Image: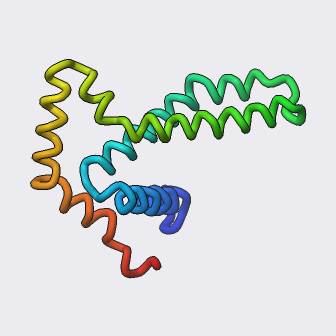
Amino acid sequence: MTRPGGLPDKAHGWFRSWFRKVWDVRGGGLYAVGFAVAFLFFEVREAIVEDIPEFIAMNNVLSSELVGFGIQFLVDSMLNFVRALLWPVYVAQLWPPAGLIALVAAFVLFPRFLKQPIERWLFQDADTNP
């Protein structure tokens, strides 16, 4: 049972706030959605494959290993940011030439069918939260 204002509600609010910023900075279209999805994908994959196992394998958490882990985490996040900026390239390379065709179709169809529902969800509480 979840209570109003609990962690799930706050996490949803944090995600929506973050995604709203991405939406505004990246132009509010398919590119913004692709960037957000790609960044989350790269970060989660990095955490599951590398970061969590590496953190568990540390012998002494109070040593310089922790500093190195933190620096590596920041570097990986910056690389994931750059990768996420290039998400259309990854989609186009998935199934040539079908990936490129799907990408062009998505850029044509997104503003027509998905942009308004996403904006309604993103900005439904924008007036109440400054």
Rendered view: 124 above or below 37: below
Q: Residue at x 29, y 47 (%)?
A: 31
Q: Residue at x 77, y 32 (%)?
A: 68
How is the rendered protein coloured? Answer: rainbow
Residue 103's x, y, as percent? 19, 35
Q: Residue at x 46, y 79 (%)?
A: 130
Rendered view: 8 above or below 124: above
Is residue 121 left or right of 85 when viewed as pictured?
A: left
The tally of labels here is 0
Q: Residue at x 29, y 63 (%)?
A: 121
Q: Nearer the viewer, residue 3 or 41?
A: 41
Residue 108's x, y, as percent? 11, 46
Whether residue 41 is visible here, answered yes or no, is yes
Residue 2's x, y, as percent? 49, 58
Q: Residue 83 falls in which quadrant of the image?
A: top left
Is residue 129 left or right of 99 when viewed as pictured?
A: right
Q: Nearer the viewer, residue 35 or 116?
A: 35
Q: Nearer the viewer, residue 104 or 9?
A: 104
Whether residue 2 is visible here, answered yes or no, is no
Q: Residue 28 falls in which quadrant of the image?
A: bottom left
Residue 112's x, y, as percent? 10, 54
Q: In this view, which residue lies farthest toward the top?
A: 96
Rendered view: 31 above or below 77: below
